[in-house]
Image: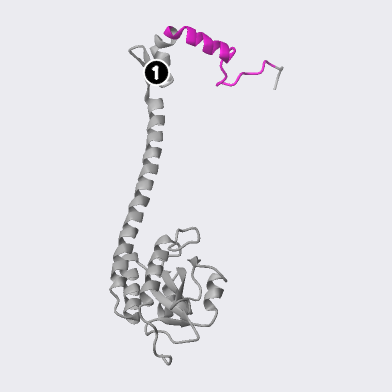
Amino acid sequence: MGGQGREAKPDNEAPGAWPELRAWLKANPQHLLSDHELLTEVGLKPADNVVAFGPAALSRLEAAVKRESGARRAVEHVARANFSAQAQTHVTVLDLLESRNHTDLATRLDHACQARFGLVAAGICLERPGPAPFGWRLLEPDAITRLLGEHGLQRLGPADHQGALFGARGQEVQSMALVRMALWSGRRDALVAFGSPDPEGFTPDMGAELIAFVTRVVERVADRWPVLDPRA
């Protein structure tokens, strides 16, 4: 209200032209270096004719260091987790190679995935028609194509068809990984199903190299022995 006065300048606006002021400070640095009070107020301090970082500048530097350290720790954590998963995978593979028959192979796979990876279950599934070894699960014809697609090799993500894939333990499965197999020279379509109790245990953006490696081992070991009894 009242008469119109001159518009006030913002508090943070430098008086005069900043390029001129900056050029003057560069040409006359002794004025800034000798004003200890001003340097302290802006968070700087002189030391042997060098302007050193003061508390405000140090706090910014420390924040940057903490961010870098946090990122480095995250990378190290992922690296340790990957190394541990690879080591557990290799132990599992050695165990699978000791299998004595199809049933023993399925049992070893299931127990190893529960004990070493915290899964609910891991099972070998085989499509009808035809028999399946004891301890394996039989699926309806074309079930694998419906689950993985016509040429799909693997699928990671939310769980469905848990009962058909995991039996009674299927209700505990919240996410799953499925990897296709072709057994006995490709005559039977099959897959290995891994079930996790964690909804984020298997996600579509997750790498599948380790579970694919385990599945290839299962495939090779299973091919050691044919299913001989057509009435099984």
Residue 153 versus residue 7: which sits nearer the camera? 153
In this figure, which residue is indicated by the disc labeled 1? 40
Q: Is residue 88 left or right of 172 when viewed as pictured? A: left
Q: Where on the picture, by quarter, is residue 16?
A: top right
Q: Which residue appears at 47% of the width and 76% of the height? A: 186
* Residue 27 pos. (x, y %): 48, 7
| 155 in relation to 135, above or below | above
Does the segment drawn in magenta span residue 114? no
Q: Which residues are magenta?
A: 5-30
Does the segment drawn in magenta span residue 14? yes
* Residue 67 pos. (x, y %): 40, 39
* Residue 77 pos. (x, y %): 35, 50
Q: Locate the N terminus by quadrant.
A: top right
Q: Which residue appears at 44% of the width and 9% of the height? A: 29
Q: Locate the C terminus by quadrant.
A: bottom left
Q: Which residue appears at 52% of the width and 83% of the height? A: 140
* Residue 109 pos. (x, y %): 34, 73
Q: Is residue 80 left or right of 137 when viewed as pictured? A: left
Q: Is residue 194 left or right of 140 when viewed as pictured? A: left
User: What is the crowding at mark 1: few (fewer than 14 residues within 10 Å), some, or many (at least 20)?
Assistant: some
Which color scheme is applied? one colour
Q: Residue furthest front?
A: 185
Amino acid type of the residue tagged 1 in the rendering: Thr
- Numbered disc total: 1
